[in-house]
Image (tube, rainbow, N blue to C red):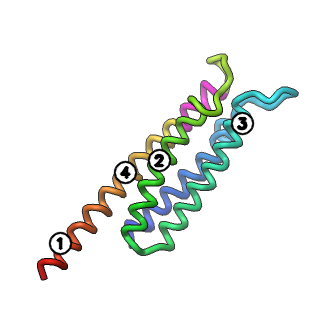
């Protein structure tokens, strides 16, 4: 239960940070008359952050370890998406000194990498634990 609660909280906090980084904490460039690419990145990251939060709540509510392992694997893929959205998919402003490139993107990279590491570690932990449990049941 401790592991499930801890991982769930990490996912929920990571989702909140994915939403708050481009909007409040390290905001993208202000939208003027013409919407820049970073505006669309912000919108996409809000959606991805909401999905991460939803998955964190699912981990908290679901006790089945195989389902939680699947959610962790899914979270690892979402973590890659957090980093790829501004880099390759929706884009950022072209000038390197703009706020979205200098602050927002590095913040999203940090959260994406941490989420990836936690998700993969949780997947491996649950996968190995489930394998040991099944082996113990077969031995008995």
> Residue 8 — which label?
none
Farthest residue toward the right? 33
76 on left or right of 126: right
Pair 1/4: label in front: 1
Are the two marked residues, 1 and 4, in contact with CB atoms closer than 8 angstroms? no
Q: Residue drawn 62% across and 18% down?
A: 96
Residue under numbered circle 4: 120
137 on left or right of 23: left
Q: Mark 1 packing: few (<14 Cα in 10 Å), some, or many (20+)?
A: few
**Cα gap from disc 3 to disc 2, whole angstroms:** 20 Å
* Residue 90 rendering spot, x and y as whole percentages: 65, 33
**Cα gap from disc 3 to disc 4, whole angstroms:** 28 Å
SS at badge 1: helix
Are the two marked residues, 3 and 4, in contact with CB atoms closer than 8 angstroms? no
Q: Tell me which segment is drawn in magenta.
A: 100-108
67 on left or right of 19: left
Residue under numbered circle 3: 40
Identify the mark nearer the N-term, 1 or 2.
Answer: 2
Decide whether the magenta segment is chiefly helix, strand or loop: helix
* Residue 42 rendering spot, x and y as whole percentages: 69, 39
Residue under numbered circle 2: 77
Whether residue 39 is situated above or below residue 95 in the rendered picture = below
């Amino acid at each position: 239960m401790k592991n499930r609660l801890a991982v769930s909280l990490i996912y929920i906090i990571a989702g909140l940070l994915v939403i708050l980084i481009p909007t409040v904490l390290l905001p993208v460039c202000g939208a003027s008359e013409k919407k820049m690419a970073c505006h669309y990145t912000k919108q996409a990251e809000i959606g991805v952050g909401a999905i991460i939060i939803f998955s964190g709540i699912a981990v908290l509510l679901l006790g089945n370890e195989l389902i939680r392992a699947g959610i962790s694997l899914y979270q690892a893929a979402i973590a890659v998406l957090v980093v790829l959205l501004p880099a390759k998919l929706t884009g950022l402003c072209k000038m390197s000194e703009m706020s979205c490139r200098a602050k927002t993107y590095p913040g999203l990279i940090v959260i994406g990498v941490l989420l990836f590491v936690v998700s993969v570690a949780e997947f491996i932990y649950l996968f190995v634990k489930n394998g040991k449990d099944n082996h113990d049941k077969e031995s008995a």
